[in-house]
Image (tube, grey):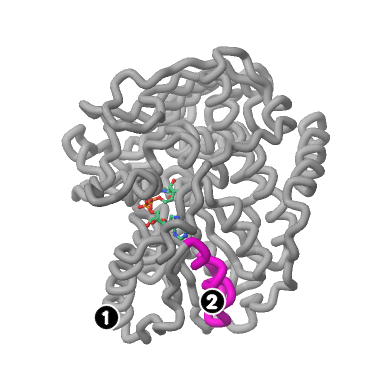
Amino acid sequence: MKSKIRRRDFLKAASVAAAGITFMKPESVFGTSANSAVQLGLIGCGGRGTHVATSFMNSTDTRVVAIAELFGDRLTAAKDHFNQLSREKKYPEIKASNLFLGSRSYLKLLESKDVDAVLIATPPFLHPEHLLATVAAGKHVYCEKPVAVDAHGCQQVMWAGRKAGPRLNLAVGFQIRHATPFVEMVRRIHSGAIGDIVMGQAYYFTSAINFPAFPEAAPEELRIRHWIYDRVLSGDILVEQGIHVVDICNWVLQSHPLKATGAGGRKGRSDSGNCWSHYAVNYEYPNGVQVGFQSTQFDPGFGDVCERFFGTKGISESHYTGGVLIKGENAWDSGVARGSQEEISKKDWAAGSFKSSFKSALEDADPNKEKAFIESIKTGKAINEAPAGAESALSAILGRTAAYTGEEVSWDKIITSNDKWDPMIDLSQFDR
Ligand SMILES: NC(=O)c1ccc[n+]([C@@H]2O[C@H](COP(=O)([O-])OP(=O)(O)OC[C@H]3O[C@@H](n4cnc5c(N)ncnc54)[C@H](O)[C@@H]3O)[C@@H](O)[C@H]2O)c1
């Protein structure tokens, strides 16, 4: 009950945060014909956007019909890639009039009548702006995580969620919630397989993320190209990457953390940015459940991502790389064996996929998520992941704030803060 009241306050604050934006009536609400292919527009043609849009085309009958990008080289590469894929599938190529370049390219894409649904895969600091505009344009939307880097952005996303429902579908890029081994493990936990959860452990240990060097880029351009090394643009590693395991903790515990303490630092990183190399956060969830979160992102790398829950009847354990199981009274094993350290280190982090041949526990995560999104558009049974997406972003922001300040921080403080980070960059300088 207490948490419901908090949520109402949160929504009220959100409507203030997003005031001033005009929302159009949803014009292209799909769902009349289950046989028609959904036409997808991609905003942000980098590693993840290209990967997910390609996976949409391979897992469903979706066609990529429009793309928007800040930089010309990325737009050209994506055009060539999707036109090649379309030719292979005997679909039309992307029309020249649906190729949009520049800082306002997303607005032009949203005006295209050809686009039913939009995939937002721009850097995190842009997600609230791009998501609000997409919902305002009356398009279905799949937005990559994190939905925002600050509390203000999360409130804007919640407000967009209220405007989207119940006619528009709004999905957030937590694909692990669709991975078969994870779905079954969480179903069993929720049915009581490990009894009452007493304590949890979640960690995201990876090597450094190496974006291309871009030696010709001026400092401002390099800042955007290398947004992942900049805490204001990315949210820092807890909000940009560790959020995946925080989201799974929220899913398993069916709640958000109530408070957090934490620490961390930058020791270990060699890039020129300002993101931290490691975090150690203690989250307290309802019923006094303590969850210890740790993450690293620097070289030499060690890769393992896992959540472990200790209950009165058993222990659950779930690794990205296989090894998703329950020990104890109600033992169960997903059957996906753990990958070796060598195989794990071959992961293509930017694309969120494994390049090696072993079977990861996330193998069907992206395709299942994309199929669910398309199915919900075609059947008209709208999904709205804005509240859960914002809740996970705020949970990660809570841990980050506790670590930055060295103080105990409460959930209430975060959701009432309306804290806004200024990226201090004018993207129109890249328009040529
Ligand atoms: N769900 C996952 O497992 C997963 C995995 C990797 C990345 N991601 C998320 O996907 C998003 C993108 O990450 P990425 O690794 O693809 O980064 P990226 O840098 O490869 O791609 C981002 C693209 O957006 C473009 N862009 C920047 N500003 C723009 C603007 N105003 N308009 C249009 N395009 C613009 C950039 O030029 C770039 O091509 C991030 O939010 C990241 O956290 C999710």
In front: label 2 or label 1 = 2
Outermost residue toward the left? 342
Q: Which kind of residue does numbered mark 1 sit on?
A: Glu
Q: Where's residue 308, x and y in %?
A: 45, 26
Residue 37 lies left or right of residue 216; in this view the side is right
Where is mark 2, residue-wise?
115
Give the residue displayed 54% in from the left and 63% down from the top.
Answer: 373
Quarter of the image where the N terminus is located: top right
Quarter of the image where the C terminus is located: bottom left
Q: Is residue 184 magenta?
A: no
Start and end of the magenta stretch? 103-118
Q: Which kind of residue does numbered mark 2 sit on?
A: Val
Q: Quadrant of residue 230?
A: top left
Is residue 8 among the parts visible in the rendering?
yes
Give the residue displayed 44% in from the left and 30% down from the top.
Answer: 307
Q: 10 or 292, which lies in front?
A: 10
Up-down relation of residue 210 to residue 415 (above or below):
below
Up-down relation of residue 68 to residue 160 (above or below):
below
Where is mark 1, residue-wise?
88
Q: Is residue 108 magenta?
A: yes
Is residue 62 among the parts visible in the rendering?
no
